[in-house]
Amino acid sequence: MSPQSFPKSKRVVRGDAFTLVLRKGGCAADDCLVVFAFAHQIDDASKTGGSKNQRRLGVTIPKKTGNAVARNRWKRWIRESFRTQQDRIPPGFDYVVRPKKGAAGGWKKIQRSLPKLARKASLRCKPQD
């Protein structure tokens, strides 16, 4: 598999993993996106399907964002941006990304925002007990 592929192992798919990232993770936002990051713990990584040095992405798009076409477009843009810029995003974290309320984003805006916000969110991540 190519280094820029996006298999299921690089996705946050379980509800408990989403909840963990959203409740306990660091957060960073700009006028387009909100990014939450949560560091893998050794035992958490095995339970939630991640490895210690891997980046995983979860995307959540609220219905207020628009109709199904608009929501799916946001998901495609975010996933593709993550996939193509994995080397610019810090490893060892689960990321959950959502568009900011009322954001009028586009592909180029997401491309610029995602790596920058991922770095900020990972730095703001609370230390683990």
Image: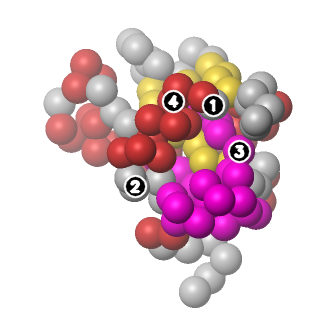
- Residue, disc 3: 39
Q: Is residue 8 left or right of residue 109?
A: left
> What is the quadrant of residue 33 in the picture?
top right
Q: Give how far apart the Cα atoms at labels 1 and 3 are.
A: 8 Å
Residue ID at (62%, 82%): 2
Residue 25 got which mark? 1
Q: How is the image coloured?
A: secondary structure
Any part of residue 124 in sight: yes
Which label's residue is closer to the chain start, 2 or 4?
2
Quadrant where the image shows the C terminus: top right
Question: Range of the magenta residues?
Answer: 36-59
**Are discs 2 and 3 less than 8 Å apart at CB?**
no
- Residue, disc 2: 13
For the residue marked with disc 1, what is the amino acid?
Gly
Residue ID at (63%, 18%): 30
Question: Tag 2's secondary structure?
Answer: loop
Q: Give how far apart the Cα atoms at labels 2 and 3 are.
A: 16 Å
For the residue marked with disc 2, what is the amino acid?
Val
Front residue of 31/16: it is 16
Name the spot of residue 14 as percent of width and height, x first. 38, 52
- Residue, disc 4: 22
Name the spot of residue 80 as percent of width and height, x first. 51, 55
Q: Give how far apart the Cα atoms at labels 2 and 1 are.
A: 16 Å
**Are discs 1 and 3 less than 8 Å apart at CB?**
no
Which label's residue is closer to the chain start, 3 or 4?
4
Q: Give how far apart the Cα atoms at labels 3 and 4 are.
A: 12 Å
Q: Is residue 18 magenta?
A: no
Question: Tag 4's secondary structure?
Answer: helix
Dot 1: within a 10 Å radius of its alpha carbon, few (fewer than 14), some, or many (20 or more) residues? many
Residue ID at (63%, 31%): 25
